[in-house]
Every structure is written in C-alpha cells, then in structure tokens.
Image (spheres, rainbow, N blue to C red):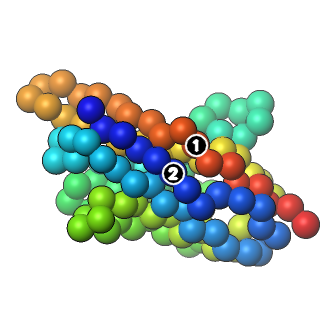
Amino acid sequence: QVQLVESGGGLVQPGGSLRLSCAASGSINSIVVMGWYRQAPGKQRESVTTITRGGTTNYADSVKGRFTISRDNAKNIMYLQMNSLKPEDTAVYYCNAVGLLETTMTGYWGQGTQVTVSS
C-alpha cells in the first residue's frame, strides 16, 4: 500500500505561481511512476505530468514550459512547480502513484488539492 498526501493548493492570480507537494509513504520501493492529474468542474480527470522511477518526465502540451515536476527521493516527496498560471489551470489537482509488486500494478491517489487561478 502507498499513501499520498497533497498540499500547497490555493488561490492565485493569473500569471502567478504555486508549488504543490505530494508526500508518499508506505511501500515506496514499489512505485514505478508518479504523476499529477487534474480535474476541472464538469470535465474528466486529465494527466498533467508524470515522472518515472528513472527520472523520465512527460508533460501535457497545455502545461509544457510552465509546469515542472520533480522529486526529493530522500524525503519521498514529489513536487509540481506551476508558473505563469492561467484561469484554465483551475482544477483539483491529484497526486498519483503506480506501484508494481511482482506482476501486479496498483494505482494510488491522494485526496486532491484545489488550485484556483482568478483575479
């Protein structure tokens, strides 16, 4: 089992910045990929960015050049640095981890943190 706890959301003006954190605990060594997803009102949850155990990152086109995913392996924390925020970035942001034990893959989700971009 993996537990994920997000923090760092809030209200920010367009053009501003926020940094989200996701603290992982439990079966950390089973995690093969982590990422951030978001869900805006009335829309499906979408992938924002992912990072593999090896450090390979992937970004949605809508956030490339503005968002950066990173992790502190010593602290078991993943970050999402969000710059040049736009109103369309408003959503609940969820931390995700995929664990692999033998041949079984399991997805884990945090509780979500609200990000609101508005003047």
Quarter of image, res 73: bottom left
Q: Position of residue 55 (x, y in %)?
A: 26, 63
Kind of residue at disc 2: Glu
Identify the residue at image location x=45%, y=36%: 109
Kind of residue at disc 1: Gly
Image height of 39 relative to 9, above or below: above
Visible in this render: residue 47? no
Tell me, for residue 64, which label it has, or none: none
Residues under numbered marks 1 and 2 in contact, where contact means CB atoms less than 8 Å apart: yes
Identify the residue at image location x=55%, y=56%: 7
Identify the residue at image location x=29%, y=28%: 106
Q: Position of residue 14 (x, y in %)?
A: 81, 69
Task: Rate crowding at label 2 as few (under 14), some (14 to 19) or many (20 or more) other CA atoms within 10 Å.
Answer: many
Tell me, for residue 6, which label it has, or none: 2
Quarter of image, res 17: bottom right
Identify the residue at image location x=38%, y=34%: 108
Image height of 2 relative to 25, above or below: above
Residue at the limit of the structure toward the top, as seen here: 104
Q: Is residue 20 left or right of residue 99?
A: right
Task: Rate crowding at label 1 as few (under 14), some (14 to 19) or many (20 or more) other CA atoms within 10 Å.
Answer: many
Secondary structure under tag 2 reads: strand
Q: Position of residue 63 (x, y in %)?
A: 59, 61
Image height of 39 relative to 23, above or below: above
Depth order, front residue of 59/36:
36
Mark earlier in primary sequence (1, 2): 2
C-alpha gap between disc 1 and disc 2: 6 Å
Image height of 35 relative to 105, above or below: below
Tell me, for residue 112, which label it has, or none: 1
